[in-house]
Image (cartoon, rainbow, N blue to C red):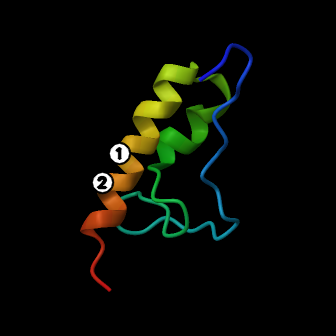
Amino acid sequence: MMSGDVTPSPCVSICALDDDDVCIGCQRTGYEIARWGVMTEEERREVLKKVAEREDGVAL
């Protein structure tokens, strides 16, 4: 990633937390959503990795 690039939010404007405190739209936890604006780029990339893992674990 080049200097100055910003990791985009995975928000898809379907905002509701499930019983595990995970958003059904973007797969972030409530804590991750609340902190997104103050996270470093490295922290955001780590969250996106976790989001991908959660998406892989979602049963269709």
Q: Is residue 13 left or right of residue 54?
A: right
- Residue 48, percent from left and from top: 46, 43
Quarter the C terminus occupies:
bottom left
**Which residue is located at x 57 percent, y 22 percent?**
41
Residue, far bottom: 60
Q: Nearer the viewer, residue 40 or 29?
A: 40
Q: Nearer the viewer, residue 28 or 53?
A: 53
The residue tagged 1 is: 50
Residue, far top: 3
- Residue 2, percent from left and from top: 65, 18
Residue type (three-letter) at the residue carrying disc 1: Lys
Residue, far right: 4
Disc 1: CA contacts within 10 A as few (<14), some (14-19) or many (>=20): some
Residue 23 higher or lower than 60, as above or below: above
Q: Are marks 2 and 1 in contact (CB under 8 Å)?
A: yes
Q: Nearer the viewer, residue 5 or 53?
A: 5
- Residue 33, percent from left and from top: 57, 44
Residue type (three-letter) at the residue carrying disc 2: Glu
On residue 53, the disc is: 2
**Which residue is located at x 27 percent, y 80 percent?**
59
In the structure shown, which secondary structural element does the residue marked by tag 2 occupy? Answer: helix
Residue 13 higher or lower than 8, as above or below: below
In the structure shown, which secondary structural element does the residue marked by tag 1 occupy? Answer: helix
**Which residue is located at x 70 percent, y 66 percent?**
13
Quarter the N terminus occupies:
top right
Residue 31 higher or lower than 23, as above or below: above
Label 2 and label 1: CA atoms lie apart by 5 Å
